[in-house]
Image (cartoon, rainbow, N blue to C red):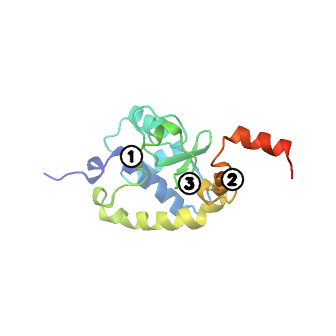
Amino acid sequence: METNVATDLLIADRIWIATALLHQQNPSQKYFTKDQIREKLDSEGLSAGIERGSLNAHLKEHLVANVPPSSGKYRMLFEPTPGNLRLFCPGDPTHPARIQQRKPSKSVPRRDEIPAQYWPLLDWYETWCKLSHAPDRPINWEDDPLIRLIGSGKHIWADEHADEYVNRLREDPE
């Protein structure tokens, strides 16, 4: 008995693959509608066995990094404008409830869990995030020079309470 490769894949991985293919095949398009993603799933044969309600839930909340999660806390997609989706990239704003302390939530398929024909997408994705998409993303706070200054002067008032330090400066500005 032959197994269907598509039905052995997680729905999340199928959607990521379809969205990655859309990005790769339409490099000038920044995001895609849910209908475009559904059509790509169909044309790639990746929609086999997926109930429409489950697919809609994945496209609406399970995979979308910047919306409150329901049951899934994956960060595989990002919604730049209502109803439009693109692949999530590290540095994109993420809903706080999706940030897990012990391990990061899934944002890309694991190579060993997808067919070898889609492995090149994982390599393409690394470059896409860094080059093609980087100008549109908000600045990563860790790279922001002003944010990196937080706490840099704490040694100045390390031996006294901050309010006392400010009051002393007000009394003797020199």
The quadrant holding residue 71 is top left
Q: Earlier in the sequence, mark 1 or mark 2?
A: 1
Circle 1 residue: 12
Labels 1 and 3 touching (C-beta < 8 A): no
User: Measured from the top left, where is residue 140 in percent x and y?
Assistant: 60, 56
Nearer the camera: disc 1 or disc 2: 2
Give the CA separation, mark 1 to mark 2: 50 Å
Seen at 43% across and 51% down, the residue is 107
Up the image or down, 143 lies above or below 33; here it is: below
**Which amino acid, by three-letter code, is at mark 1?**
Ala
> What is the number of callouts on the image?
3
Task: Indicate the secondary structure of the residue bearing disc 3.
Answer: loop
Q: Which residue is mark 3?
A: 91
**In the figure, is residue 134 to the left or right of 64?**
right
The residue singled out by tag 2 in the image is 156
Tell me what residue is drawn at x 40 percent, y 37 percent. Answer: 72
State how far apart marks 1 and 3 are (Cα).
20 Å
Q: Position of residue 23 (x, y in %)?
A: 53, 59
Residue 79: x and y, percent?
Answer: 57, 44
Q: CA distance from mark 2 to mark 3?
A: 32 Å
Identify which amino acid the numbered label 3 is placed on.
Answer: Gly
**What's the residue type where badge 2 is placed?**
Ile
